[in-house]
Amino acid sequence: MAEENKSATLTIDGQSYELPLHSPTAGPDVLDIRKLYAQAGVFTYDPGFTSTASCDSTITFIDGVKGELLHRGYPIDQLAGKSHYLEVCYLLLYGALPTAAELETFESTITRHTMIHEQMYNFFRGFRRDAHPMAIMVGVVGAMAAFYHDSTDISDPVQREIASHRLIAKMPTIAANAYKYSIGQPFVYPRNDLDYAGNFLNMCFSVPAEEYQVDPILSRAMDRIFTLHADHEQNASTSTVRLASSSGANPFACIAAGIACLWGPAHGGANQACLEMLKEIGSVDRIPEFIARAKDKDDPFRLMGFGHRVYKNFDPRATVMKQSADEVLDLLGVENNPILAVAKELEQAALNDPYFAEKKLFPNVDFYSGVILEAMGFPTSMFTPIFALSRTVGWISQWKEQLSDPAHKIGRPRQLYLGETERDYVDIENR
């Protein structure tokens, strides 16, 4: 917890209470209300906990007004432009950028954990063919606790470390298997000669009948998608992982809970919603119609993939993602894909319209990542699983941080009760 150096006075019914104020290294001061109920007999009311700090953390910092996202102090645009996903994983997990030797060891460890237990393939075959890949991932990741008993004891630092490596390494395999199963193709085993992103693309798109070459531009774009979604502070799914962890649940159950939360369309489905909007627009000539609808206050239509709930100026991840989107579209072209043609024209139309500039409704990371994944050939049902794959390291880093905090306790939010007060039971014949 940040050092306590200030206080605030709260007065209730003429009685005053001194509450500590903590000053973080970045961001606004935090009012400490942990003893408020014991002292004053009242709770605070904050639906969605949007004004409540549930923990202290050293991992990720967001300043939505400035459009700033830092991982362990490093700006996301520098990490996405100069680093790569597994190096960012190391940074999030251990708090510092690795040396060359440390990175080589870490990458080797992750690479050699990418295979899943052979009996786990039976889980995939037990789902219906039309099962959503996220449903499969929730089930399979939760089931990992039934196979990897040597990494479920959260009191053992060594087991926590093994579980962390296993989850980061095996999540691409699980996501790719969910995709392959949904389209009726054979599972593809991971390859140790490929890097993290290239291995995922190979497991998704290669088939036994012919050789598949991983294009370096596509691999780099996928790596950036992973990097730009690696962690995002105390969002809904991360908070879910922390809440599940607070009960002492095993790591696989906690990450499965995070995946389930991410599945919600208000959280992890933004890039899928963006693609569905592009499909609704349908053709370039209809863009002016939808631009006009977006400006109409009486029309419920909204441009998906523009603006951001947290970032009030611009999404710092979008600049790097736009670069990858341009590279991918230059490589694959948009001539035979009307959705991508609409995306490219809509981007320019919105960027050149003063209305969107005034409202700061710029294309965000979801817009560009959706365009990239569509161009690569992923169905929209795979967008959120790829998000879950990317966010796994963030969830694990937050999970590890919470477990190492000696002050952590089980989560137990309070409520503002508005129901009936005590009343007597009435026998059924008298009702």
Image (cartoon, grey):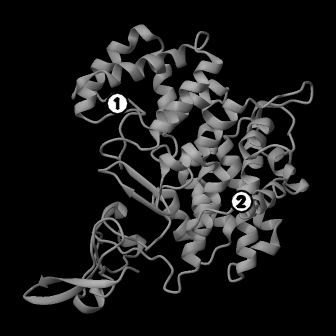
Neighbour class for label 1 at 10 Å: few (<14), some, many (≥20)?
Answer: some
Answer yes or no: do the residues labelled 1 and 2 have beta carbons within 8 Å? no
Q: Position of residue 419 (x, y in %)?
A: 30, 69
Q: Residue at x 84, y 45 (%)?
A: 190
**Res. 302 mark:** 1
**Res. 100 mark:** 2
Farthest residue to the left: give it: 14
Where's the N terminus, which quadrant?
bottom left
Q: Position of residue 399 (x, y in %)?
A: 58, 69
* Residue type for callout 2: Ala
**SS of the residue under disc 2:** helix
Tell me if I can see residue 273 in this picture: no
Q: CA distance from mark 1 to mark 2?
A: 46 Å
Where's the C terminus, which quadrant?
bottom left
* Residue type for callout 1: Arg
Q: Position of residue 413 (x, y in %)?
A: 40, 74
Asked if 418 appears above or below 358 in the picture, the reply is: below
Q: Residue at x 82, y 74 (%)?
A: 150
Q: Quadrant of residue 266?
A: top left
